[in-house]
Image: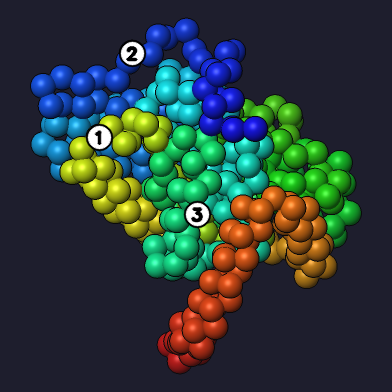
């Protein structure tokens, strides 16, 4: 089945809010693109990346190309509606984490993160200098999308729990928020896994609807207020070692733009990608200190839990290998990741260990 034609034919019934969406604005050489997002307005880091990207395009174009950012719930509500509204042409573009859409195609996970996958540097090596962006575009062909990476959270924390995790058995029956293929791996350990928009996570944790959640890292997690509910915080996770965010643009709409406007979108997305990554990294350490001062107990998963994560993750990845595009992307990613890690281990890895030893 041609997924793109099917999506256009069924539209987004039941997902679009009551606010009417206007047709693309084109007047006197000026264009306006409506960007729907997966994020609540003001959500630390992720919504910042969307706004930063839009502001850059608006500034570079000197007003000839305007991107109007809509938070989740303003034009469409829910994660699936963000994707559907763009592929159907009812909105022009989205900003989201592409792994929210593994139900559409499992390969979308590789453009956010897969369990035991790439660090930010490894992801960017692959995306910008090897096959990454080519595969992002190839995947988008099935859905009528033209996509770019546009943000990165850096390494994500293992998450917040109501009790300590002492063995893999502690995940059995645990109600836990984790999207993407990492969530599917936790499901293999017996967890009841949920995918919730970021704006709904605090209330779900506070009400007991979930027993725990991953979100991003100390700065964004502190902003979300999870420390007000639970004090057990696992600072390293297996699921998102360098989570990318993306803009997905309706391909017909993108192709209708001038070459100059297309390039502005590409450049602004790349700059937002770098800016957002270091927004997180610059803020995480001080936020972690504040969390610890407030009584949060920072923990690491035991080795046997990491072993269970690894076994489950391989099972999830292997289960998708019958899909030809997933197989090609996985093989490309793992080849690139192995090559990047070989040099990083002998250069930055050794340097970091020696700096700590010499300077303390």
Q: Where is residue 275 in the image (x, y as percent from the top left)?
A: 32, 54
Q: Residue furthest front?
A: 1
Q: Position of residue 243 (x, y in %)?
A: 52, 53
* Contact check, label 1 and label 3, Cβ < 8 Å: no
**Dot 3 lies on which element?**
helix
Quadrant of residue 7 within the rendered picture? top right
Residue at figure coordinates x 78%, y 53% from the top left: 319
Q: Do the residues labelled 2 and 3 touch (CB within 8 Å)?
A: no
Q: Can residue 236 be seen in this view?
A: no
Mark number, residue 135: 3
Q: In this view, does 298 lie to the left or right of 47?
A: right
At mark 2, the secondary structure is loop
**Residue shown at the point (48%, 29%) measured from the top left:** 87
How far is disc 2 from disc 1 in space, using C-alphas?
18 Å
* Residue positioned 14% across, 31% down in the render: 64
Which mark, by number, is residue 22? 2
Per the image, label 1 sits on a secondary structure element best described as: loop
- Which corner quadrant holds the N terminus? top right
Measured along the vertical axis of the image, is residue 177 above or below residue 273? Answer: above
Q: Which of marks 2 and 1 is nearer the N terminus?
A: 2
| Circle 3 Cα neighbour tier, 10 Å, few/some/many (<14 / 14–19 / ≥20) | many
Label 2 to label 3, Cα distance in Å? 31 Å
Q: Nearer the viewer, mark 2 or mark 3?
A: 3
Residue 60, can we see it?
yes
- List the residue tagged with mark 1: 257
Depth order, front residue of 27/109: 27
Q: In which quarter of the image is residue 61?
A: top left
Please state which of residues 177 and 122 is positioned toward the viewer in this rendering: 122
């Amino acid at each position: 089945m041609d997924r793109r034609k099917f999506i256009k034919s069924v539209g987004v019934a039941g997902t679009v809010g009551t606010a009417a969406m206007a047709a693309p604005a084109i007047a006197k050489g000026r264009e306006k693109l409506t960007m729907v997002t997966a994020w609540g307005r003001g959500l630390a880091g992720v919504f910042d990346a969307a706004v930063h990207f839009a502001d850059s395009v608006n500034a570079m174009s000197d007003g000839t190309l305007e991107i109007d950012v809509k938070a989740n719930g303003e034009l469409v509500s829910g994660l699936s509606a963000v994707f559907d509204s763009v592929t159907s042409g009812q909105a022009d573009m989205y900003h989201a984490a592409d792994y929210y859409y593994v139900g559409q195609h499992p390969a979308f996970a590789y453009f956010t993160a897969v369990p035991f996958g790439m660090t930010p540097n490894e992801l960017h090596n692959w995306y910008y200098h090897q096959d990454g962006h080519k595969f992002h575009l190839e995947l988008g062909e099935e859905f009528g999308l033209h996509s770019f990476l546009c943000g990165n959270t850096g390494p994500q924390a293992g998450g917040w729990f109501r009790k300590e995790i002492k063995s893999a058995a502690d995940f059995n029956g645990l109600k836990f928020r984790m999207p993407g293929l990492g969530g599917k791996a936790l499901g293999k350990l017996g967890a009841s896994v949920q995918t919730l928009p970021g704006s709904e996570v605090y209330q779900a944790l506070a009400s007991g609807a979930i027993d725990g959640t991953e979100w991003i890292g100390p700065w964004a997690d502190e902003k979300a207020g999870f420390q007000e509910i639970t004090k057990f915080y696992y600072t390293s996770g297996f699921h998102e070692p360098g989570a990318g965010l993306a803009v997905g643009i309706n391909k017909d709409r993108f192709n209708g733009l001038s070459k100059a406007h297309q390039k502005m979108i590409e450049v602004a997305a790349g700059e937002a990608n770098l800016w957002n990554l270091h927004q997180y990294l610059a803020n995480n350490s001080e936020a972690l200190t504040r969390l610890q001062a407030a009584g949060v107990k920072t923990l690491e998963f035991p080795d046997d839990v990491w072993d269970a994560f690894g076994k489950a993750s391989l099972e999830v990845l292997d289960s998708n290998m019958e899909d030809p595009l997933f197989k090609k992307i996985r093989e490309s990613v793992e080849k690139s990741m192995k090559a990047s890690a070989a040099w990083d281990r002998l250069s930055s890895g050794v340097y970091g260990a020696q700096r700590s030893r010499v300077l303390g």
